[in-house]
Image: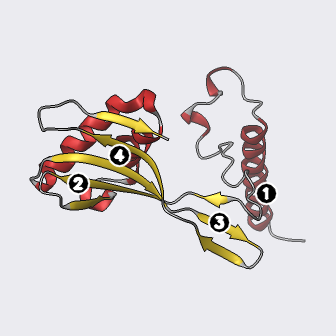
């Protein structure tokens, strides 16, 4: 027979494992009710479909690149690093507004950030996509595609945004 502390320790660890698995199951099935439903109280037990969308042969996976053009024709690649920010600010300031015409007003603060950070004035910002295509032999790089563009004829003109 095992000593009492060892049995108690195993029982506590087993109870902890069952609790963790139970909470994750509840979150994954979405059966939480009341104030726990979709709230931070369930963290880190979340129903997050990280890899739920499969990709098949022939599918393309987008790879976006934001390029800004200054008044003198210089091109600047706009990345989280060149902005001095993180992925989420870059995504919300450039990718979302250039992909979705309903969010074009969200583009102006991002443009102003680039202009302040680099000490330049921009006349064009474009969103390029060079997708990867899945094949039976691996991944191929597809042709460059323009996904969205914002232009202004002069510095004092408003931005005109087009999305494809």
Residue at point 73%, 51% (across, down): 52
Q: Quadrant of the N terminus?
A: bottom right
Does dot 4 land on a helix, a strand or a loop? Answer: helix
Q: Answer with left or right where residue 139 lies relative to residue 101.
A: right
Q: Answer with left or right where residue 14 lies relative to residue 140.
A: right
Residue at point 44%, 40% (across, down): 96
Q: Can residue 125 be seen from the camera position used here?
A: yes
The label on residue 130 is none
Q: Nearer the viewer, residue 140 or 114?
A: 140
Does dot 3 land on a helix, a strand or a loop? Answer: strand
N-term-proximal mark, 4 vs 2: 2
Percent of width and height locating residue 118: 14, 56
* Neighbours of disc 2 within 10 Å: few (<14), some (14-19), many (20+): some
Residue at point 44%, 27% (across, down): 102
| Figure check: 141 above or below 56 | below
N-term-proximal mark, 3 vs 2: 2
C-alpha separation, residue under disc 4 versus residue under disc 2: 20 Å
C-alpha separation, residue under disc 3 versus residue under disc 2: 28 Å
The label on residue 89 is 4
1 vs 3, front mark: 3
The label on residue 14 is 1
N-term-proximal mark, 1 vs 4: 1
The residue labelled by disc 2 is 69
Q: Residue furthest bottom?
A: 137
N-term-proximal mark, 2 vs 1: 1
The label on residue 133 is 3
C-alpha separation, residue under disc 1 versus residue under disc 3: 46 Å
* Neighbours of disc 3 within 10 Å: few (<14), some (14-19), many (20+): some
3 vs 4, front mark: 3
């Amino acid at each position: 027979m095992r000593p009492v502390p060892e049995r108690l320790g195993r029982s506590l660890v087993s109870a902890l494992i069952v609790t963790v698995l139970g909470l994750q199951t509840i979150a994954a099935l979405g059966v939480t009710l009341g104030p726990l439903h979709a709230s931070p109280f369930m963290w880190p037990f979340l129903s997050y479909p990280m890899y739920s969308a499969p990709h098949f042969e022939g599918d393309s996976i987008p790879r976006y690149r934001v390029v800004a053009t200054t008044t003198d024709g210089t091109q600047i690649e706009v990345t989280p690093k060149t902005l001095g920010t993180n992925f989420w600010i870059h995504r919300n300031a450039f990718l979302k507004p250039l992909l979705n015409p309903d969010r074009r007003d969200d583009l102006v603060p991002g443009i102003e950030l680039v202009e302040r950070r680099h000490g330049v004035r921009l006349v064009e910002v474009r969103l390029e996509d060079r997708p990867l295509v899945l094949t039976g032999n691996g991944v191929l790089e597809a042709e460059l595609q323009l996904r969205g563009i914002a232009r202004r004829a002069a510095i004092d003109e408003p931005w005109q945004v087009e999305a494809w």
